[in-house]
Amino acid sequence: MTAVSVNGQSGFIENQRVFPRVAQAIRSKEDSLKKQFANAKLQWPAKDVYIRSFKYDSQLEVWVRNTSAEPYKLFKTYKICALSGTLGPKRMEGDYQVPEGFYYINEFNPKSMYHLSLGLNYPNASDLLLSDSIKPGSDIYIHGSCITVGCIPIQNDQIEELYVLASHARNQGQDFIPVHIYPVRFSNNRSQEYLDRNSKEDKEYQKFSTRLKEVYDYFEENKKLPLISVNKKGEYVIL
């Protein structure tokens, strides 16, 4: 698998452009992205991108801003076009679960088996404490092709757009593009009720999802991201 890890900034777009799929994506999507940003009164290219995903709701949101002092603004919501696993975090290799928690993009893969893909830093610090100690799993991506065994797939034309947008943010100096993966959209009553029904016998998962909701609520109120740490129990904590 050919991939570009997240290190170095200068010339990132030009380095990506040598790959045919990325070059084609830039040709076909960049002008459209500029127009979409202009219509939404957003500054192109975005210097700061934030992605959040909702498993039950099958949605992937892209938020943008240009300085840390600004609140994020919603740019677009993509439909997640295939699902695997159930509600709940990923805890071992081969469980087909999409992770839940707080991650960042650590890889741009221009030669993905699934058109283009953006890799996530699973397992993170929490996963390493709470997941299988020998085989927690790996290779979690946002990608195209609409098939999955534990990743987050969107349509090929959408991953092209997102890949170009993320590449520009990387080129502008954003080393870590945060990706937050939630079981449900907590502010949607139907989604919250679904989570409640499916976790009523699982006290540990109730506690885990409550921690996720704290971060969700913070962002909903402030349109900024809190500082998040992991304690010795593997629990997420807002600092």
Image (cartoon, rainbow, N blue to C red):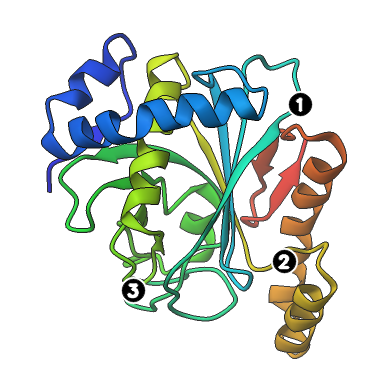
Kind of residue at disc 3: Val
Residue at screen point 59% across, 77% down:
87
Q: Which residue is mark 1?
A: 71
Instruction: Say which mark, if any, is on residue 9.
Output: none
> Distance between the Cα atoms at labels 3 and 2?
22 Å
Q: Is label 3 in a helix, a strand or a loop? A: loop
> Which of 1/39 is in front?
39
Is 15 in front, or is 97?
A: 15
Considering only vertical position in the picture, is 170 above or below 123?
above
When the figure is inspected, residue 145 is found, relative to residue 167, above or below; the finding is below
How far apart are the two marked residues, 2 and 1, measured between alpha carbons? 25 Å
- For discs 2 and 1, the disc positioned in front in the rendered view: 1
What residue appears at the point 40 percent right and 22 percent down from the top-left corner? 168
- Mark 2 falls on what kind of element? helix
First-in-chain label (1 vs 3): 1
- List the residue tagged with mark 2: 209
Question: Which one is in front in this view, the residue at disc 1 or the one at disc 3?
Answer: 1
The 10 Å Cα crowd at callout 1, few under 14, some 14 to 19, many 20 or more, is some
Tell me where residue 29 sits by quadrant: top left
Amino acid type, mark 1: Pro
Q: Which residue is mark 3?
A: 149
Q: Are marks 2 and 1 in contact (CB under 8 Å)?
A: no
* Residue name at image x 17 percent, y 57 percent: 113
- Left or right: 208 with respect to 222? left
Number of numbered discs overlaid on the protein picture:
3
Mark 1 to mark 3: distance in Å?
34 Å
